[in-house]
Image (cartoon, rainbow, N blue to C red):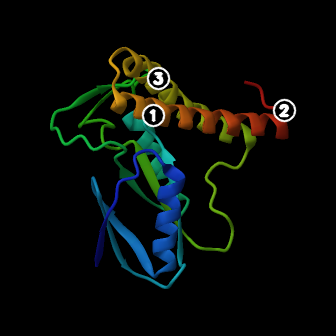
């Protein structure tokens, strides 16, 4: 077993590429925790990974989605997007769907991401195939980015806080990435916003 400690926040693509590189080195993911990724040996490049944002879902829907992916032959792990070490924490997510707006240790707190593994078949690993499905996914990612930007940008200005400014810039970058992806999908097909 080999252990690595990393933190990716909500940089899903970077996390997936790093997991793919670990697989290319002959290491397969077997366990995750807050910062920990534990690997076992495998054939180089045997597996591919995708990291999915699921913080907007209720616990039941997120677990149903994970079971659905497992039924499709994938392996899945829930992963944290934040580093809060509190026990008994409750987080309000006004951007989430009903049932996911209050996150606690008993629901989806520290289970905001889903790491999905498949055997490498030489094809790109995409969980969302239709334009409408991709658009739904980008809209779900856009909501928390917009919420974080709307909260942090005024705090950065009013309090002259550089940490709040950094979060505002990161949220704006995530927001723009989602918006550009949605615009690209709209150009490709008859997608309505």
Tell me residue 188's x, y (percent): 83, 41
Mark 1 secondary-structure assignment: loop
For the residues labelled 2 and 1, the Cα–Cα distance comes to 26 Å
Tell me residue 69's x, y (percent): 51, 54
User: Which residue sits at x=48%, y=48%?
Assistant: 11
Mark 2 secondary-structure assignment: loop
First in sequence, mark 1 or 3: give its number.
1
Tell me residue 167's x, y (percent): 41, 33
Mark 2, Cα crowd under 10 Å, few <14 / some 14-19 / many 20+, is: few
User: Which residue sits at x=37%, y=36%?
Assistant: 59
Can residue 108 be spotted in the picture? yes
Residues tagged 1 and 3 counted as in contact (Cβ below 8 A)? no
- Foreground mark, 3 or 2, reads 3
| Mark carried by residue 57 | 1
Can residue 96 be spotted in the picture? no
Work out whether 116 lies above or below 190.
Answer: below
Query: So how many labels did they put on this image?
Result: 3
Residue that mark 2 sits on? 190
Residue that mark 3 sits on? 147
Location of residue 151 by image quarter: top left
Q: Nearer the viewer, residue 81 or 168?
A: 168
Work out whether 190 lies above or below 72.
Answer: above
- Foreground mark, 2 or 1, reads 2
């Amino acid at each position: 077993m080999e252990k690595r400690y990393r933190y990716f926040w909500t940089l899903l693509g970077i996390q997936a590429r790093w997991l793919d590189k670990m697989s290319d080195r002959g290491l397969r993911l077997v366990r995750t925790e807050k910062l920990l990724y534990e690997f076992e040996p495998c054939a180089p490049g045997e597996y591919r990974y995708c990291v999915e944002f699921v913080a907007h879902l209720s616990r039941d829907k997120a677990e149903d989605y994970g079971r659905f992916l497992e039924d499709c032959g994938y392996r899945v792990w829930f992963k944290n997007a934040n580093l809060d070490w509190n026990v008994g924490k409750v987080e309000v997510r006004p951007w989430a769907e009903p049932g996911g707006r209050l996150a606690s240790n008993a629901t989806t707190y520290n289970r905001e991401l889903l790491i999905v593994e498949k055997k490498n078949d030489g094809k790109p690993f995409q969980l969302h195939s239709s334009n409408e499905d991709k658009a739904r996914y980008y809209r779900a990612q856009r909501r928390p980015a917009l919420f974080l930007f709307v909260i942090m940008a005024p705090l950065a200005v009013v309090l002259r806080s550089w940490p709040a400014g950094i979060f505002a810039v990161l949220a704006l970058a995530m927001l723009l990435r989602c918006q550009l992806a949605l615009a690209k999908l709209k150009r490709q097909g008859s997608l309505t916003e």
